[in-house]
């Protein structure tokens, strides 16, 4: 379901009338055409005091404290997909990476690499997605960059966002805090984003269209830290490589083992069906709008309850626990009572998923 | 001349022996191959406490104050050029953008978009360039990202760097501070970087090889602010679009005029010659290792003297002044006594120069 706010914003931000409808190399020159592109409505759309300065960087006041800083480039293909577009993904992705550090994203940078021939209509739709996602997350785009490369040297649009934000005062998130007995929670259905992209790429038709769950997680995470503070030992969003990769990295870096309970892992029926059809294991499929929390055992049930009451956590579930046994290994306990090792994937099931 | 330190670093950082020599899509999967790529020596090469955490973002303490935040993507072609490579450029570029805000860059992010088929040898050389430039500038790479796109969907390597740093306590740099009578200084020869790239692309042979002047400017700028503080009204590095673009933007945004003295503009003879040969105006050619300073008239001679005593400023010169006459217009006073309007360039003389 596309949210009403998203539709409303698209209606409120129609593309301005322009005397060009295709991005050309000149739009990346830094000269008149670049200025014309940015003044065509781009700056107006993303408007805020810091961006309006149009200097080489943004300048803002910071309080003393702990800051988080994160970056990601987004190369997803196709750039428009059910449930979102590359612009929303680029904002949500960096907001969420900061949230996983325990920080509330505040200022974002935005850098485009456009391929010559991109239509202004496509670019505008991505920009509106950026504005929408930024407003939902409560962040500002404060500085940016636009480059254009020749046709065939890029792929429509690549976006880098970087972001900074201050740590929640009660955040104490680190792999070093993970210990045997900790419970592993997931905030929602796994593999939804990856299968939504896959269904478009493969031209699969399901009874219901699978939508990417891309969204910001910062409000949810800040709420969690308000209440549970340092009972939250680790947060991680299982994007590329999926849940299996994140848990394997955790096991490797902490030198602890992980028991994963198959019956606890939430997967939408249509996602499970699509995975089966394509021979994919949902544990390895990329996610967007969910996160894994490793929490103190004593707090696990309360954290679960808290998450389930949140918009982004209605399908939250306890999916496993950390153990001192079988160090560095992730063991899946299947629904029918079997056990198998979940390895880190070698290569790529689904390239360019984010 | 390639600096001795650069040669020394290249010798100290030989490429490790690897069981692969080509970047494949799997290296961007987030899985085992990504880990293998990063553990192949990449993390070791750029090693520091913050990067070693390998979380979704870097966390560091900040003091209360004014922070600058800047981003740029680098798409220069070719990625290796006389005097540097895309890695050095990516570090220096963002360090310099922060310097132009009056900030000392401290923490940088580093995001790669690699094209499938890039050789590990090329990637390694770029990485060593990054390490070299970061050490010279005194900054740390604290967080990063690596994506891989299919052959023909990128061009060897695109790099985004973003960076943060605190403002110099005496910095008070803003277009709003520029006023009639202010002097305009340039720190070095113009058009050198652009013509160095152009000479490679066009296969031109000169008697001496033109080298890009890519370098960090933060030490020079911090020194300048130490001594002259708020006499420095504005700083700008004339990269894409060259000196003409920066001055036109300045005239437009301040609604003031600019008088530019041709005889004051430093251009290397071989650069002037190459420009003539190719029919290019050096005022529009991209620069890297130089900056423009708009300073209070009373301080201009002392600033010039200061710059000329600095490694990066030996060719510094006063190139013009701000005037209330002919608002929004940049007027060039030629060596032979003529006057002409210097317009903002429309498109691109030299695409993908940074």
Image (tube, coloured by chain):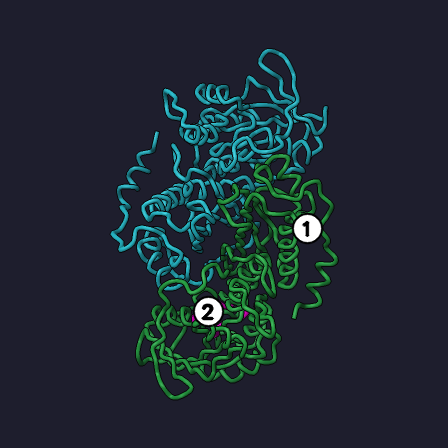
Chain colours: A cyan, B green
Residue appearing at x 43%, y 72% in the figure? B279
Secondary structure, mark 1, is: loop
> Which chain is indicated by disc 1?
B
Left or right of residue A257: residue B352: left
Residue A172, relative to residue A265: is it above or below?
below
Whole-percent x, y for residue A244 in the image: 59, 28
Whole-percent x, y for residue B136 in the image: 65, 63
Write the start and end of the magenta stretch as one range: B284-293
Instruction: Name the mark nearer the viewer: 2 or 1.
Output: 2
Residue B225, label in figure: none
User: How far is the residue under mark 2 from the one under mark 1?
Assistant: 36 Å
Residue in front for this viewpoint, B96 or A113: A113
Q: Quadrant of the N terminus of chain B?
A: bottom right
Q: Badge 2: how crowded within 10 Å, few (<14), some, or many (20+)?
A: many
Residue appearing at x 53%, y 81% in the figure? B304
Q: Residue furthest bottom?
A: B337
Q: Quadrant of residue A177?
A: top right
Residue in front for this viewpoint, A335 or B113: B113
Q: Are marks 2 and 1 on the same chain?
A: yes
Residue appearing at x 34%, y 32% in the figure? A2
Residue B285, label in figure: 2
Residue appearing at x 74%, y 58% in the figure? B11
Q: Which residue is mark 1?
A: B47
The main secondary structure of the magenta stretch is loop
Whole-percent x, y for residue A27 in the image: 38, 57
């Amino acid at each position: 379901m596309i949210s009403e706010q998203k539709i409303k914003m698209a209606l409120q931000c129609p593309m301005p009338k322009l005397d060009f409808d295709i991005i050309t190399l000149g739009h990346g020159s830094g000269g008149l055409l670049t200025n014309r592109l940015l003044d065509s409505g781009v700056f107006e759309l993303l408007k805020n005091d810091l961006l309006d300065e149009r200097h080489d960087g943004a300048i803002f006041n910071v309080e003393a404290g702990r800051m988080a800083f994160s970056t990601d480039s987004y190369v997803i293909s196709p750039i428009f997909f059910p449930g979102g577009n590359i612009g929303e993904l680029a904002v949500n992705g960096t907001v969420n990476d900061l949230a996983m550090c325990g920080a509330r994203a505040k200022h974002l940078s935005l850098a485009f690499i456009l391929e010559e021939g991109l239509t202004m209509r496509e670019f505008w739709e991505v920009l509106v997605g950026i504005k929408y996602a930024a407003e939902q997350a409560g962040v500002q785009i404060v500085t940016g960059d636009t480059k254009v490369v020749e046709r065939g040297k890029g792929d429509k649009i690549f976006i880098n966002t970087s972001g900074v934000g201050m740590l929640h005062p009660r955040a104490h998130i680190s792999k070093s805090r993970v210990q045997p007995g900790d419970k592993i929670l997931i905030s929602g259905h796994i593999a939804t984003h990856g299968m939504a992209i896959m269904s478009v790429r493969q031209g699969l038709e399901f009874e219901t269209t699978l939508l990417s769950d891309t969204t910001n997680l910062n409000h949810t995470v800040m709420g969690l830290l308000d209440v549970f503070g340092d009972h939250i030992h680790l947060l991680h969003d299982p994007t590329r490589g999926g849940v299996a990769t994140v848990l394997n990295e955790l096991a490797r870096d902490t030198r602890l083992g992980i028991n994963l309970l198959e019956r606890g892992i939430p997967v939408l029926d249509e996602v499970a069906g699509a995975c089966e059809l394509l021979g994919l294991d949902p544990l390895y499929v990329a996610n967007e709008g969910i996160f894994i929390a490793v929490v103190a055992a004593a707090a696990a049930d309360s954290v679960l309850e808290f998450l389930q009451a949140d918009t982004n956590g209605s399908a939250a579930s306890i999916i496993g626990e950390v153990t001192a046994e079988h160090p560095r290994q992730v063991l899946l306990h299947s629904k029918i009572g079997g056990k198998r090792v979940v390895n880190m994937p070698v290569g790529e099931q689904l390239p360019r998923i984010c």
